[in-house]
Amino acid sequence: MKEEEMTDLPNIVVGLDIGTTKIATIIGYQGDDKIDIIGHGKGDSTGVQHGLIYNINKTVDGINVSKEQAEKRTDCYKVNKVFVGVAGRHIKSIEYKHVLTRINGKNFVIKQEEIDRMLKDLYNISVPSGERIITVIPQHYVVDKEIDTTEPVGMLGELIEGYFQLITGNESEIKKILLCVESAGLKAEDIILEPIASGLSCLSEEEKNQGVALVDIGGGTTDLAIYYEGSPVFTKVIPIGGTIITRDIATVCKITEELAEKLKITCGTCIVEKSNSNHYITLPQFHAAQPPQQINETYLAKIINMRVQNDILDQVKREIENSGYADKLRAGVVLTGGGATLRHIKELCQYTLQKPVRIGIPEYGFMRNIPNDLKHPMYATALGLLKYGIMKTEQAEEEESGSDTTPEAEEPVVKVKKPEKKPEAEKKPKKKKNEDDEFNSGITNFIMRKIQEFFDGLLDKTS
């Protein structure tokens, strides 16, 4: 791309996916109606296990390789800011209730600014030591204790009770991500939960409205995100992914992990009954003196099936059932991530979860001329991070331009019941503290008034 052409483009955004098996950098911008990709690169991820960074230098090397490849494809653009994903076994979720009181709320409709304010408040609450809030996911709202909705904007009401899911991560693990990004000469604009990013690129709006479970099987983790009525309502990170299957094959068959990965992709299947017991595979040994061994396809399928069934899909099933949304997934399940390309995993998932299943390719919101090598489930997160970054950038621009206009007069007076700054760890906030305080204050005022009336009566009699 020519330099003069580059200057005519809108804001360019970069998504950075630091995965267990690869590190991907995607560069793009918002076109007239779709996102256009102008550069992408991939580096090996040798410093990450189960979604956690254990070697800073190796991870920085992988970031630099992917960044330089992506920059080269753009001809002249230099990456300096990125939207980066986070996952791993340290991710936790907490349910939280937040209340907003609107004086005169019966006369004025609820505005989006009020709902946004509730969300922003939650980023400032105290969490257990060593943890940090990554994102806040609205689940539903109750207006005046009567109407349960996911879209309170436009309604009349004096009391809004918001129910949210707070996603937290280990502070030290997040600092490692930021350190790697900074060491590669980059700045992290925002950190996003990876399953939410994957959902942006792989799910249609209709699926999100109908109810769908996104299952992203990566190298080190399997990420679950459930959407209902258009929004994410439940997330979970399972600390097992496709890499452990590769290691099982390497250990049992006494071969290198590189060969085991090729074997898994070319000859493996998730369903034992679908394998060919008459097909034998010759495996070279570590030592040339040892004769090569042979295994049949069924033996390989048993190794793969054990991990996929017991440690991935059965856990996904339990988490979906625990979420409370198992009966609301009318759009079924979407499988994505590198693990979604395992042979017959779609059929096994459909059998295990008893729901319709499709393989999710990152395609929603992107130009049709997206590079062919990116039309793969393994790039769902990276492309989702890019899409999130573009949405976030446009939102910031709208807010900035809106701040230059004359603000409208405050309509209802709003009182926000903010969460306590330092709640005790592992305890949920008291939900009726303000109501109890008002009640006790009313009783006290009533008693004091009666005492005053009694003494006033005595004074009148003595006079």
Image (spheres, grey):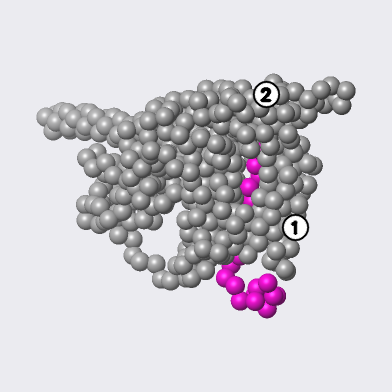
Q: Which residue is mark 2?
A: 295
Residue at image location 68% in from the left, 44% down from the top: 22
Badge 2 amino acid: Ile
- Tell me if 245 is positioned left or right of 317 in this view: right
Which label belongs to residue 68? 1
**SS label for mark 2:** strand
Which residue is at the far bottom? 4
Q: Residues within 10 Å of mark 2 (few under 14, many from 20)?
A: some
The x, y position of residue 246, in whole percent, is 66, 30
In the image, which residues are magenta? 1-20
Query: For the point 30% across and 30% down, which residue is it?
Result: 436
Name which quarter of the figure residue 442 lies in.
top left
Q: Residue at x 63, y 64 (%)?
A: 38
Q: Which picture quadrant has residue 326?
A: top left
Percent coordinates x, y for residue 218 in the rendering? 59, 38
Of callouts 2 and 1, the N-terminal one: 1
Vertical relation: 238 (above or below) 32: above
In the rendered image, the vertical position of residue 252 relative to residue 328, given as above or below:
above
Q: Is 326 in front, or is 114?
A: 326
Where is residue 153? Give x, y as percent: 31, 53
Going by the image, does 96 lie left or right of 409?
A: right
Tell me the crowding category of disc 1: few under 14, some 14 to 19, or many 20 or more residues within 10 angstroms, Cα based.
some
Residue placed most toward the observer, 394 or 414: 394
Residue 5 in the magenta stretch? The answer is: yes
Q: Residue furthest right?
A: 289
